[in-house]
Amino acid sequence: MKSRLLGAVSACATAFVSLTAQAVPVSGQGTWESTLQGRDLDGSPATFEAYYDTTLDITWLADASVNGQMTWDAANTWANNLDVNGVTGWRLPTMVDTGTPGCEGIAYTGTDCGYNVQTGSAATTVYSEMASLFYDTLGNLADFDTSGATQSGSGLSNTGPFSNLWSSYYWSGLEYAPVTSRAWYFRFNNGRQYSFYKTFGGMYALAVRPGDVSTVPVPAAVWLFGSGLMGLLGVMRRKR
């Protein structure tokens, strides 16, 4: 019995790890071309290191798997300590646990758990940042429609401007309240939101930051160098 259980867990872990294929940007699909605004964080305007989401009022890190697969605790530590050329204050994407019984079975719409989950409301409540990115911003489809029927063209067909956004599992920053050894995640391969054990090391992590990052911060060393240079120029002028 024990060997069967270990085999089942191993098979489940293999399924988690193996679903890692990357899609491409698809023009005209979703809202990403108008709602994601590129942000230069390294002083090189030719590339963007982040994207401001005008719908959610958060900034996404452009590299969607910069640190590889990890456990939930490691993902939180990585995001919370992330420093992108002086830009700090990052975290994992979050969601709202609405308390509906979706996780007790397979829900196809209207809950916090399952497929076609709630993304937002007219009252500007953001129910799931990753679901909003997957469904609304990138225009991807879940494996099942709202009636529970399979639909063609599902999965991560559009990555928008992100690099390394995998058709795989990504941790949410929210703990799963009924079982605190688990945390929420979102599956970018089929659009399902669910929970799994925090100790599992086969999930990726997205980094987000509240609000906008519109300017490139100047490192303290540059300010010190500039101050020193101005002081030197002042001395030279006085000598003249």
Image (spheres, rainbow, N blue to C red):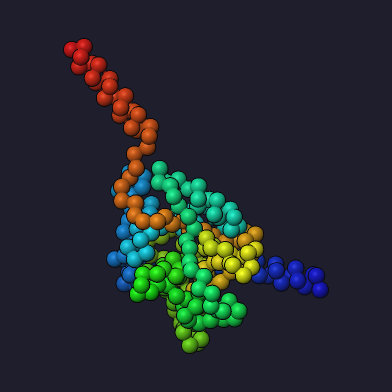
Image height check: is 188 above or below 87? Answer: below
Quadrant location of the C terminus?
top left
Image x and y of residue 40, in percent: 33, 49
Q: Quadrant of residue 10?
A: bottom right
Residue 50 can be seen, yes or no: yes
Q: Residue furthest top?
A: 239
Q: Quadrant of residue 30?
A: bottom left
Image x and y of residue 237, in percent: 20, 17
Image-based side of 67 in relation to 126, left or right:
right
Quadrant location of the N terminus?
bottom right
Q: Residue furthest left?
A: 240
Residue 158 can be seen, yes or no: no
Image-based side of 118 in relation to 196, left or right:
left
Q: Nearer the viewer, residue 57 or 37?
A: 57
Q: Nearer the viewer, residue 161 or 57?
A: 57
Image-based side of 184 in relation to 208, left or right:
right
**Which residue is located at x 59 percent, y 67 percent?**
177
Image x and y of residue 219, in percent: 37, 37
Image height check: is 160 above or below 150? Answer: above
**Which residue is located at x 58 percent, y 53 percent?**
74
Image x and y of residue 204, in percent: 54, 60
Image height check: is 91 above or below 111? Answer: above
**Which residue is located at x 50 percent, y 50 percent?**
80
Q: Quadrant of residue 129?
A: bottom left
- Count of numbered tags: 0
**Which residue is located at x 36 percent, y 47 percent?**
41
